[in-house]
Image (cartoon, rainbow, N blue to C red):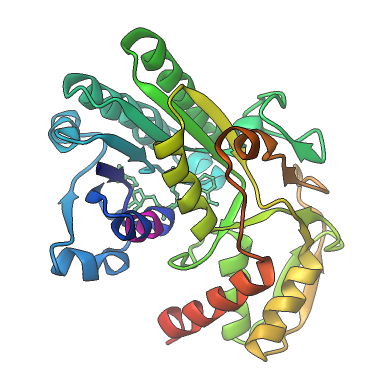
Amino acid sequence: MRALITGGSGFIGSNLVELLLKEGYEVKVYDNLSSGHIENISSYVDKRDIEFIEGDIRDAEKVKEATRNADVVFHMAASVGRQRSIDNPALDSEINLVGTVNVLEGMRANSVPKIVYSSSAAIFGELKEPSINEDHVQNADSPYGVSKLAAEKMILSYSGIHGITGICLRYFNIYGKNQRYDAYGNVIPIFAKRIYDHKPITIYGDGEQTRDFVNVSDVARANLISSQKCNSTSIYNLGSGSTITINELASIMQDISGIKVPIEYKPERVGDVKHCKADSKKIENELGYRAEKKLDEGLKEYMEWYKAVCVK
Ligand SMILES: NC(=O)c1ccc[n+]([C@@H]2O[C@H](COP(=O)([O-])OP(=O)(O)OC[C@H]3O[C@@H](n4cnc5c(N)ncnc54)[C@H](O)[C@@H]3O)[C@@H](O)[C@H]2O)c1
């Protein structure tokens, strides 16, 4: 199988590169390295195990060229995150929506039959229920949520009009190897940085809010399974099957590192939900996917990786 991974030098994409190579895929990565890191994939690029094309998803001609000869596209290139999109909404839409059209047009021109798209729980906006299945109301409340939802809809339209099979995987909170700290980042890398910097951790609210964290190895596997087993256009929520409070998370991460830092509690942020869990029954029932990595094991691996790679 020949796979094109857009955004393949990023956090999730680089983990998928590793898995697809193990599975014997021919892998091509298309990425402009804007938030991805060439170090995530340089060992494969140097050994010519994969082909790396440095390019922007907004460059329609170059994207079309990249899709040539692919059997499947894993589309992960995106401007990621709510706050980033609020700061630069036009850029968000150009990359996330127009970029997706460019990928689909390239696929259409080159008769590529299948796309596995990295979507997001951000398409739901404010979460109204403690366990979120695919039918939860879609009230995207940020430019990012809107562009990710619009890209899903675009994939569905290409499926209907051009017969491309589109599989949209809606991720919730993902963590794991190659997830670096950035200013717009997620809670686990932020906590890791604070702990290894010996600085206080900030928790908004009382810390008893719960979240569903999925290890990136499970997300990469869900992409692989989707490409292999899913032959009709489908949408799936992707979770871990369990939740943890933010207080417990901070405590476990400190225990793993052997470093104790103060916790500073700040008022709850507007829009933060108390409990959030993905209902992944649909992908479990239809494709046999189930998250395998236990959170304590995944956090231990993550903290080891973070210490080795990110702590100077
Ligand atoms: N990390 C999460 O918790 C999470 C949650 C929900 C959805 N997602 C989705 O998963 C996908 C991967 O996210 P990630 O967490 O690995 O983020 P990431 O920032 O590490 O990866 C995104 C990749 O896309 C590349 N990219 C960005 N703009 C580009 C452009 N204009 N042209 C070409 N490449 C470009 C970046 O360089 C990077 O390698 C995204 O589509 C994101 O929306 C992630």
* Residue closer to the observer: 267 or 122: 122
Position of residue 175 measured from the top left corner of the image (x, y, whole percent): 56, 61
Q: Is residue 10 left or right of residue 41?
A: right
- Residue 217 located within the stretch drawn in magenta: no
Residue at (33% x, 53% y) in the render: 20
Q: Which residues are magenta?
A: 14-18
* Residue closer to the observer: 114 or 1: 1
Residue at (22% x, 65% y) in the render: 44
Residue at (46% x, 22% y) in the render: 232
- Residue 15 located within the stretch drawn in magenta: yes
Classify 167 as above or below 308: above
Classify 32 as above or below 67: below
Q: Is residue 61 left or right of residue 141?
A: left
Q: Is residue 230 left or right of residue 124?
A: left
Picture quadrant of residue 215: bottom right
Asked whether residue 68 appears in the rendered view, the answer is: yes
Magenta highlight: main SS: helix
Position of residue 119 measured from the top left corner of the image (x, y, whole percent): 50, 37
Classify 28 as above or below 70: below
- Quadrant placement of the N terminus: top left
Position of residue 171 measured from the top left corner of the image (x, y, whole percent): 57, 44
